[in-house]
Image (tube, grey):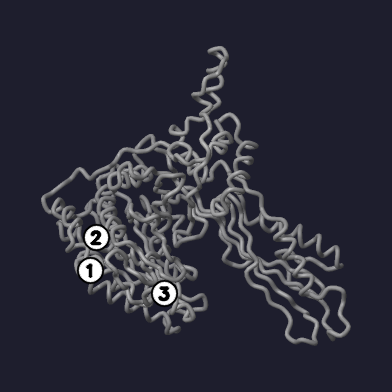
Amino acid sequence: MASYEKLPMQPQLPNVATMPVKKSASSRRRRLLLVPDFKAQCPQVEPIQPKHQTQALSDMESYFSTVKFRNESVARLSGAVKIPSESYDDLGPVGEDKRWDTMYDVAAYLKATFPAVHEYLELEKVNTHGLLFTWKGSDPSLKPTVLMAHQDVVPVAQATVSQWTHPPYSGHYDGAYVWGRGASDCKNTLVGILEAVEMLINAGFTPKRTLILSFGFDEESSGREGAGHLSNTLMERYGKDGVAMIVDEGSGNVPTFGTYFAVPAVAEKGYIDVDVIVRMPGGHSSIPPPHTGIGVMSEFITMIESNPYEPHIADENPFMNILQCGAAYGPEFPDDWKKLMPSGHHTGAKKDKLARAVAEASRPMKYLFTTSVAVDVVGGGVKANALPERTTALVNHRINIGSSSADIKKHLTKLASKLADKYDLAVNAFEGDETQSSITLRASNNTLEPAPITPTETDSLNPFVLLSGTIKALYGDKLQISPALMTGNTDTRYYWGLSKHIFRYIPGWDPEEAGNLDGVHTVDERVSVTGHVNGVKWFTLFIRNIDEAELP
């Protein structure tokens, strides 16, 4: 998941838009025209509250603020965290590999914990463990809404268990946080959605627009068995662009530039793994060549790391929205960056200068507009006295918005060809089989281009305005809203054909804590209960708002 770091306070420079200039009025006007109107570039929407209200719904809203509800919510979330529903990269077929069986425990727990959901919504088991709930609306002409989460969690390495403050599957509650693997990724979202629907059912709410809850079970490994099958079922049922909007886990509400932003991700970077194979003659190590296959591979790895991809903010990259909103509302937004912000008249060269400036200042931000490359796995050699005949490396890339897997292949082929010429090796670049004395490049079968960009216009009611208005309804001006993107990939990769309006957003937020992703994928994962309860509130508001919205 993407993260946005808090930048140090920058020296305050005079604002060129308002500073005195001893020139003619026409000259001052020309100068003003060159300064971007940052707030105009980062429009904020008005809060959207549900119009339909009943006494039962009003009582439900009041109940959310009680200690009783908080304790009940803690118990539900804690119980889910106690189930070690770990997902592994090497899982065998569903139904054959017994490690999948923990998902039966998740389904049984959810059935016992949310009886109204299971009574009033239709539940389909897709590929055994995928949970597809359908709350049928009264108006079948309206496109359904899809809320997503995943049931699985990242495995806890046995060697790290002693490092946890509380055992990873204890679901421990310390009065402020629920601790454990999955607490913030993403059993909080899974449980929060179901809590919201359970509460709405008990308050007598019935939807006009069909609501679908789609819960995969292998997001942390590939999503292929869970989301892959669930999305196929939905595509067969509703067709291309047959869903009004989709909300999945993703970015949340974060501190940056001296203030807080809600950053729903409207895009994801692409993904490609490339296998590199160096084949060299074998022989006895007592008579080695100047460079063994491992030596040649080492040189290739050095070439890769010495020739990184350049920072580039494409016109369509949502990261530009982050910068515009930071300039508009962030008291700590660097003034030097403001000078480099495009005004609308000059974009290309100016944006590249801006990209380089941001990349130099912030490594986490850099990879929101730069293709990342990491050599993650290396292998070669079988014996101390035998020259390695086959040396391998796995090179992972997260593809920048505006780039493509073809660009990655072209870049690596150029480097490999240069190295091959030096050592008189053949190059097999993304086609053909390995040969003797060669460098072979091979793309994995999980290549993913950057995701389609969700529209974010704010001039009329649309899914982005509805999502943003619901955020404003709950949090008011404590949060400004900016579209953003994910550096990693979520289960939404399988849902692109279902809707043009896909959002990756964690709505739960505790204003008293710095972030909502503590310990994700590492020790001491936890989630604020205040943030979790706010997430439940948000889902109830959102479900009611989308139900009332005049959208297709």
Q: Is there CB contact under 8 Å for labels 2 and 1?
A: yes
Which residue is most to the left? Answer: 55
- In this view, 121 is above or below 510: below
Q: How far across and how far down the image is residue 91, in percent?
A: 49, 79
Q: Secondary structure at mark 1?
A: loop
N-terminal label among 3 and 1: 1
N-terminal label among 3 and 2: 3
- In this view, 184 is above or below 284: above
Residue of label 2 = 197
Q: Amino acid at mark 2?
A: Val
Name the image quarter holding the C terminus.
Answer: top left
- In this view, 95 is above or below 423: below
Residue of label 1 = 114
Residue of label 3 = 164
Name the residue at 57% across, 60% down. 271
Q: Amino acid at mark 1?
A: Phe
In whole angstroms, how far apart are the C-alphas of marks 3 and 2?
Answer: 33 Å
